[in-house]
Amino acid sequence: MRVDGELQDLAREVTDAQTVEPVTIDSEDGLSILRHSAAHVLAQAVQRIDPQARLGIGPPIHDGFYYDFDVAEPFTPEALKAISKEMDRIIREGQRFTRRVVTEDEARAELSAEPYKLELIGLKGPNDDASVEVGGGELTIYDNVDRDGETVWKDLCRGPHLPSTRMVGNGASLMRVAAAYWRGKETNPQLQRIYGTAWPTKDELRAYQARLEEAAKRDHRRLGKDLDLFSFPEEVGSGLSVWHPRGGIVRQEMEQHARRRHLEGGYSYVYTPHISKADLFMTSGHLETYKEGIWPPIHMDEVVDADGAIVKQGADYYLKPMNCPMHILIYKERARSYRDLPMRLAENGTVYRNELSGALHGLTRVRGFTQDDAHLFVTPDQLEAECGTVLEFVLSLLRDFGLTDFSLELSMRDDEKSKWIGDEEHWAEATDALRRVAQSSGLHLTEVPGEAAFYGPKIDLKTKDAIGRTWQLSTVQIDFNLPERFDLEFTGRDGSRQRPIMIHRALFGSIERFFAILLEHYAGAFPVWLAPVQVVGIPVAADYADYLDGIADRLRAKGVRIDVDHSDERMQKKIRTHTLAKVPFQLIAGGTDAEAGSVSFRFLDGTQENGVPVDDAIDRILHAIETRQTELVA
């Protein structure tokens, strides 16, 4: 249940003065509680089998949960089967989750054999609200109590949990094992992490497993290799991609289409370097706030004499983690008037983040990536209208790429004043403006208190792909902080010096990640306007290759990407090869076609129309490209 907005166990006492709301197990909160409880069942099962296993943490995550363990030997597939059986026994036992508030001394005494729990107790504090173990204002231990009233297992945890292990039911399953550094730091011990999932029913579990199977088929890393789109050469380094010619074509089409739309929307493109002196990121606050995520400095410009004495002190340079400070310098290069605003600066700017190696994942989590960044400088009275225009622009452009299912999330400031800067009035006005913009879009809106960055509220746009997965894409972020840090000004209508408001806007987020999302959304079968090869000509026999070459020349003159297969393979083998390569259209021609001036028009799903006049085939292809057609069967 939620009591005055706070999630609590059903066993907690409430008063008539408190507002109580039920939490169902199939709600977002309910699923999180179910999965957190399943994580505790997993930990208990591991320690039943191996009492020497030491506990890390076990939070719920998207679609599942995990628990970290310090064990003498890595978990094997056979070990996972044994753990799963032990979990089933614990679930059937119907143990009660019972909450106790304890002091630090009591917690240390009870968990003296758990070194990682003892470390977490030492981290307890009022601002540690992100931890599943010690977040919040109290230390709590959850006892698992059997039917005889005996405590059979316990764990340090903030909760809440299900009333009983029986409610975990038969919708839980262990998925895989991975290595994970304690608290995500490579200098800490490496633990064994067991991932699992949990759903209210067995049928929902099976549906989820079917979605995973489909997702595996669409994995952009596999498709990238199979379709020869990109790679991560070991010689270059982890998390740094190179783009092959076919992948480069898709990326170029994405970027050029977005560029055209931006120019139509009143944006100006700028270019900034990949590296900058440390002072810039000191002023912006990035070096102080995100130092662990920034690459180590490069020391330059130092001059020494023949004796090795320093004549000129050097300076530290950093690979840029963000484009915004450099865009601010462009704004600041000369005096600005209200007539110059809104100023919309856009850049496909490559940035670098020092991500942990264990966090890297194909193109979706990399160390070097290109943001389709835009920064808008507006007057206060332009803020709402400009945010509305930005959101409309973002939705329109994403629809161009075939995405249609959207929702919005409004992140608002924390109630605690130390967690945000600026004055309450500006925050309230900005938040209300974003709320009105979001509501006017007609999309489903979720408001999330306390999730805003310290420098302003934001709207995050989320989309669902072809198999129902939710991805966070674009962000419209209001920023009061950087204009203040860089002392930005403009001259108002009355001649006074005023402070502009800055809007950060990433449309794709990163081009690499958006490419990966589209690749999985289309399962590699890009719509014809994006496809690396849009058409392939397949002669029934070598005698008809020249006929198809003539058609290909006409299409190339119109900018169509077409190949004619002159290989010695049999026609059926050619058809299969280009179908596996996800080429949208195949034009097949033999003697009858050559005499009639026609082709057989074959689609990616295997359907085929015979005797299509060449002019009609060309018109159909051009129409599919010009209209960004996503359904390839006419």
Image (cartoon, grey):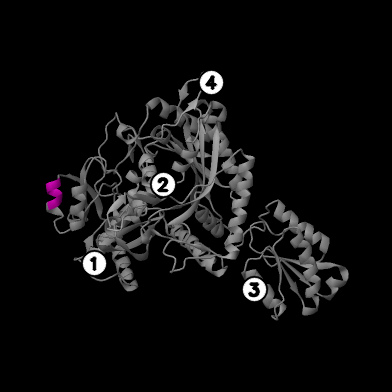
Amino acid type, callout 3 = Thr
Place of residue 393 in the rendered image (x, y in percent of width and height, measured from the top left): 59, 40
**Of the two numbered discs 1 and 2 in the rendering, the one whose residue sits closer to the viewer:** 1
Say whether marks 2 and 4 touch (CB < 8 Å). no
Disc 3 to disc 4, how far (Cα)? Answer: 65 Å
Give the side of residue 108 with respect to residue 263, left or right. Answer: left
107 horizontally vs 556: left or right: left
- Which label's residue is closer to the chain start, 4 or 1? 1
Query: Between tags 1 and 3, which lies in front?
Result: 3
In the rendered image, which residue does mark 4 sit on? 493
Question: Could you say where residue 437 lies in the image, as x and y percent from the top left?
Answer: 53, 33
Query: Which mark sits nearer the N-terminus, 1 or 3?
Result: 1
Judging by the rendered image, the residue that carries numbered circle 2 is 28
Question: Which mark is first along the chain, 2 or 1?
Answer: 2
Q: Marks 3 and 4: which is nearer the front?
A: 4
Dot 4, crowdedness within 10 Å: few (<14), some or many (≥20)? few
Three-letter code, disc 4: Arg
Residue 50 appears in the rendering: yes
Q: Earlier in the sequence, mark 2 or mark 3?
A: 2
Q: Label 2 vs label 4: CA separation? A: 49 Å
Give me the residue at 69% from left, 59% from top: 632
Say what amino acid the circle numbered 1 marks: Val
Quarter of the image containing the N terminus?
Answer: top left
Quarter of the image for the C terminus: give it: bottom right
Q: Which mark is residue 577?
A: 3
Q: Residues within 10 Å of mark 3 (few under 14, many from 20)?
A: few
State the SS at label 3. Answer: helix
Residue 184 vertical position relative to residue 393 in the rendered view, above or below = below
Of labels 2 and 4, the one closer to you: 4
